[in-house]
Image (cartoon, rainbow, N blue to C red):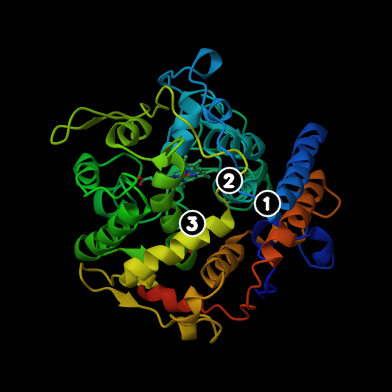
Amino acid sequence: MSLKLGSDIAVMIFESATLFSLAAFAFPSNFKDISEDTLAELTELAARISRESEVKLDSTKRALNSDAQRIDTTGDHAYIAPGPNDIRGPCPGLNTLANHGYISRTGVDSVVAVTAASTAVFGMGVDLSAFLSVYSGVMAGDVTSFSIGGKPKTGGLLSGLTSSLGLLGEPQGLSASHNRFECDASPTRMDLYKTGDAVSVNVPRFEKLAAMPKGPNGYDITVMSKWRGACFNDSISTNGHFFTGPFTHLAVNAAAHAFVYRFFGNWSADGPYLDLETLKSFYGVTGEPGSFQWQQGRERIPDNWHRRPIGDEYTLVSLNLDAVYAITTEPQIIAIGGNTGEPNTFTGVDLVNLTGGVFDAATLLEGNNLACFAYQVASIGAPDILRGGLVGTLLGTALSKLADALSPILANFNCPELIKYDKSLLEAFPGAGSGL
Ligand code: HEM
């Protein structure tokens, strides 16, 4: 597949259909298009991305507004433990949203709903939340909706669009997205090939995180960056199939660690602080250090908890800054590669060879290059049909509108063009599997 990537990272999922109208992809005869209503929702999402990215350019510091930042945990948004048919998965943020009815309590919802809830409840920038959600829709769902955990038992919202497109088979949900989304060296989950369970909180691991010396703002970014280094080292020494792919490691793993503080921290007049009680609540952990307990589906927003200031959302650019910061404090984590079958056999891929000389370990830390590389690689994993096989369909129209909304934001990243990506270099790693 040729890569026409450049600074247009939006290509990853949202490749403008018109650009590729001559491509030789055709949609299958059993193709089920989205409804006019879904098209309208996705069109509104695209408009919102454009509106909010313009506001973001105005970098005025946002004032605190305690009432607006306090998140409702009553009435429709009271915590309710999931029922037997409700699904939960590897993301404590999404599990929390479902447990409080900010997204469907079933654990299956549309990319539009997940984007909106992540932004409203946690202050995630709409660029980042739309990217994460649409990526999940494509890689683990039916393009417009997805399961936050395993495969839906009842079908739920999922229309089977993806399987009708013959893309990645039946939508499996985030829990089964290993190395496409779900990845190794997570803050509280174990590596898939180590325990077979990358979805549940591993209590001994949570104990270690909780015991980390706190920073000035509790479990803040200094702590989470050190913790990320510790998780990386642990995976090297215990998981023979440890794998660090460009997208999952440089973007998703960075996000998983940074999000803990950036989104779970409680904002007061003095700024954000993440204490142990709040951390436990968002992770659904009870008990005291040394005897913590975890049960699936207990993630909760603490009462009287305040999100980030309105207008100070955490965006794709914010994530890149945190990802670079983590590498400057824990330089070993920059390595793309993996163990070669046994613990302590970590071998890094030469970035120059992998990227045709576009990036090396030094240039990767410049500007937005880390994000550029990660998202360009994510684009390679997008099913070919999205690159032009949907012309004339409502779904194609919707994806094209999203592309148009995201392109200007991503063009600001000024990415060097990744003209070559030698994925064969990753074949040396048994844990890479279908990883990008
Ligand atoms: C917007 C849509 C989102 C999607 C599709 C998503 C997806 C995921 C996935 C697949 C993982 C597993 C990564 C791994 O293996 O380490 C994950 C982890 C994580 N996510 Fe999300 N997420 C989203 C939003 C959020 C939000 C809003 C928050 C915080 C409020 C959040 C916080 C986290 C954290 C802290 C982890 C690490 C879990 C651990 O301790 O191992 N995510 N997310």
Location of mark 2 (residue): 313
Identify the residue at image location x=53%, y=87%.
357
Measured from the top left, where is residue 408 in percent x and y? 74, 61
Q: Nearer the viewer, residue 323 or 384?
A: 323
Which callout, 1 or 2, points at the residue further toward the start of the chain?
A: 1
Cα gap from disc 3 to disc 1, whole angstroms: 29 Å
Which callout, 2 or 3, points at the residue further toward the start of the chain?
A: 3
Residue 290 is marked as none
Q: Secondary structure at mark 1?
A: helix
Answer with left or right where residue 436 lies relative to residue 340. right
Q: Is mark 1 within 8 Å of ligand 1?
A: no
Q: Nearer the viewer, residue 182 or 65?
A: 65
Q: Is residue 271 above or below residue 380?
A: above
Q: Secondary structure at mark 2?
A: loop
Which callout, 3 or 1, points at the residue further toward the start of the chain?
A: 1
Q: In the rendered structure, are the residues bearing label 3 and label 1 in contact, judged by CB atoms less than 8 Å apart?
A: no
Identify the residue at image location x=78%, y=47%.
398
The quadrant of the image that shows the N terminus is bottom right
Which quadrant would residue 120 be assigned to in this image?
A: top right
Nearest to the eye among marks 3 and 1: give it. 1
What amino acid is at disc 3? Arg
Location of mark 1 (residue): 56
What amino acid is at disc 2? Glu
Measured from the top left, where is residue 106 in percent x and y? 51, 25
Location of mark 3 (residue): 180
